[in-house]
Amino acid sequence: MQNEYSDSDIQVLEGLEAVRKRPGMYIGSTSEKGLHHLVWEIVDNAVDEALAGYCDDIEVVIHQDNSVSVKDDGRGMPVGTNTKTGLSTIETIFTVLHAGGKFGGGGYKVSGGLHGVGASVVNALSSWLEVRVYREGEVHYQRFENGGHPVSPMHVTDKCAQDRTGTTVTFKADPTIFKETTEYDYDTLANRLRELAFLNKGLRIILIDERGDGKTETFCYNGGIIEYVAMLNKNKEPLHDDIIYVEGEEQGISIEVAMQYNNSYNSSIYSFTNNINTYEGGTHEDGVKASLTKIINNYARKNKMLKDNDDSLTGDDCREGLAMIISCKHPDPQFEGQTKTKLGNSEVRKIASDIFSEGFDRFLMENPSVAKLIVEKCMTASRARIAAKKAREMTRRKGDLDVTNFFGKLADCKSKDASVSEIFLVEGDSAGGSAIKGRDSMTQAILPLRGKILNVEKARLDRALSNEEIRTIITAFGTGIGEDFNLDKLRYNKIIIMTDADVDGSHIRVLLLTLFYRFFKPIVEAGHVYAAQPPLFVIKHGKTIKYVLNQEELNEYISTLSPTTKYEIARMKGLGEMDAEELNETTMDINKRVLRQITVDDAIAADEIFTKLMGEEVEPRREFIAENAQFAENLDY
Ligand code: 1YM
């Protein structure tokens, strides 16, 4: 036991204290996302050990008290003393900021980058943390408490089998730091661990949830990203059987691409660098996309599918219905962009392009029947694009979307300042009428939606543009669509979907969200889309009228009333049955309403849900509804 702190101890503790003072700087936030970040830090170290070739199995256990263990069967962290700090290497790794990288001799860390702030940060933000290293028949152990204070120096606590090696780290997130929640979400952990297993072929990751009824899943994919693409297309109809796979390495940079076309009109292209999802793309993605377009055009011209006078196929034409995973591993990745998820290394563009071109070109030559299907699909996309362009041009000319005609539907706001303007998309004419009367006409525009809007999951842009409701929405937004899309031209800061809290209402909401997600994704990503939440109950007592959103709030409100108070509860009818004043009071007034922002946390999961809910295949939809029926029952319509 240490009774006195030396100078270097004090420095170390000051370092950890800095993390506790500003956790956001190290793990982004202390929300649920930040909490899960702790797990990723430790898992990344285990994945690094797997990438170094020493570890095949990683196990993640969520214990009943929401502490988490991460276990690997690698070499085990070094158990010697660190000459610089005079502490054991383990204590150094867990108490000195950014120590991990410096002490890892040779090789490069393939994970990390965005994460990789290290094990010491996890220790600093934990109520307690224990490390166990299995090496040469002994278990080396150390425990830290209260944000990284060692309870004892590292010592041997036990014997183990001579051939057992590995590292286990167990920690409990500090609830005084993670004030929102210290409870892990199973699906968040499962999705990321599955992704890591896809991206590192052969690596076996087991997730065990000891809470509640318990749950265990094993993720292991010998096909790696080929199996990832198979999963992306699971609920879609693939255009060809084989998944195309290309890999190569140049200058220590490895590129892997797996792809398969399906008969949908959307592309699902996801790129990664060192296991990190590069949402904003970058040079690896640019290189592969440019080659894809070039190789398909070359093939189509050489085989006379495109005639000399025909225009070339565009990038969008070549990516319609494409599911693709691009995985790059780089010794020194430079991440750029707003969220640091864009690969910036310029040398990667040519390397990715060269590797992919060679492999894809060879595939097309060796598989002429698949090549023909792919080129035909791209040419159909091209024809639809040209038709859509004509349709769009029509929307710009006089006619249906003529301003005078159009403003008959839209009750626009007076303000032309987009930053304060909002538009309500309202289900039905009668609710639309009340909303127009009840709004603040300075900043609130109302667009009543009469018919059901078209399901764009099953339609291309040209058909979508022939749908009147959709054309009206496009014109109201002001951004244009497809190639003309420009987020800067959005006329409203908030787009608020206002539908009834019943099955029809949710159907319209999902149709609108599908439209936004597929055709106006940047609007969703920039956080402009909201759902209004009309109240479900009204409670009257004396002269007080109180609206509440759900059963929970109802119970809570009633519990605040004195037992002698007489009150009446009424269930609110649809939006259409509220008068203007009620609608304003409950759902529209900026100071009283509750809006729900629609966000896209996980594009891959969102894509899957839209395919399931709105796509051609019936069976996945049935399954999804069956799996989620319990939630629907809990909703009090
Ligand atoms: C559950 C988390 O951290 N495993 C792990 C970490 C290390 C090693 C093995 C390791 C690395 C090296 C040599 C090396 C780390 N070692 C260090 C440091 N699992 C987990 N497994 N020997 C063992 O990189 O050369 C940092 S992490 F710095 F000590 F080398």
Image: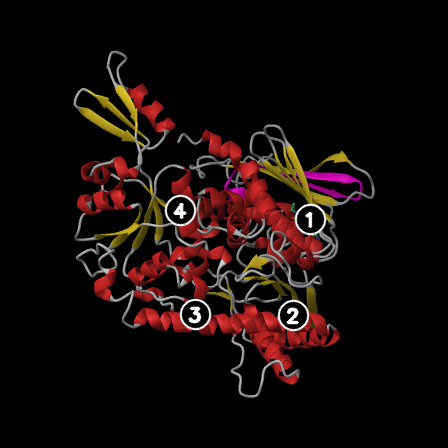
Mark 2, residue position: 373
Which residue type carries mark 4?
Arg
Mark 1, residue position: 77
Q: First in sequence, mark 1 or 2: give its number.
A: 1
Residue 89, position as x, y percentages in the image? 65, 49
Residue occupying the point 26% across, 53% down: 422
- Circle 1 sits in a helix, a strand or a loop, which is it? loop
Q: How many angstroms separate mark 1 from mark 3 (CA)?
A: 59 Å
Residue 344, position as x, y percentages in the image? 51, 70
How crowded pointer 2 is (Cα within 10 Å; few <14, some 14-19, many 20+) is rated as some
- Depth check, mark 4 against mark 1: the one in front is 4
Which residue type carries mark 3?
Ala
Residue 219, position as x, y percentages in the image? 68, 46
Asked if marks 1 and 3 touch (Cβ < 8 Å), the reply is no
Outermost residue on the right side: it is 162
Q: Which circle marks residue 509 in the picture?
A: 4
- Depth check, mark 1 against mark 3: the one in front is 3
Residue 435 lies in the magenta stretch: no
Left/right placement of residue 93 relative to residue 73 reads: left
Q: How many angstroms separate mark 2 from mark 4 (CA)?
A: 35 Å
- Circle 4 sits in a helix, a strand or a loop, which is it? helix
Left/right placement of residue 190 relative to residue 127 reads: right
Q: First in sequence, mark 2 or 3: give its number.
A: 2
Q: Is residue 251 in view?
A: no
Mark 3, residue position: 388
Which residue type carries mark 2?
Leu
Question: Which residue is at the front of the view, 633 or 559?
Answer: 633
- Depth check, mark 4 against mark 3: the one in front is 3
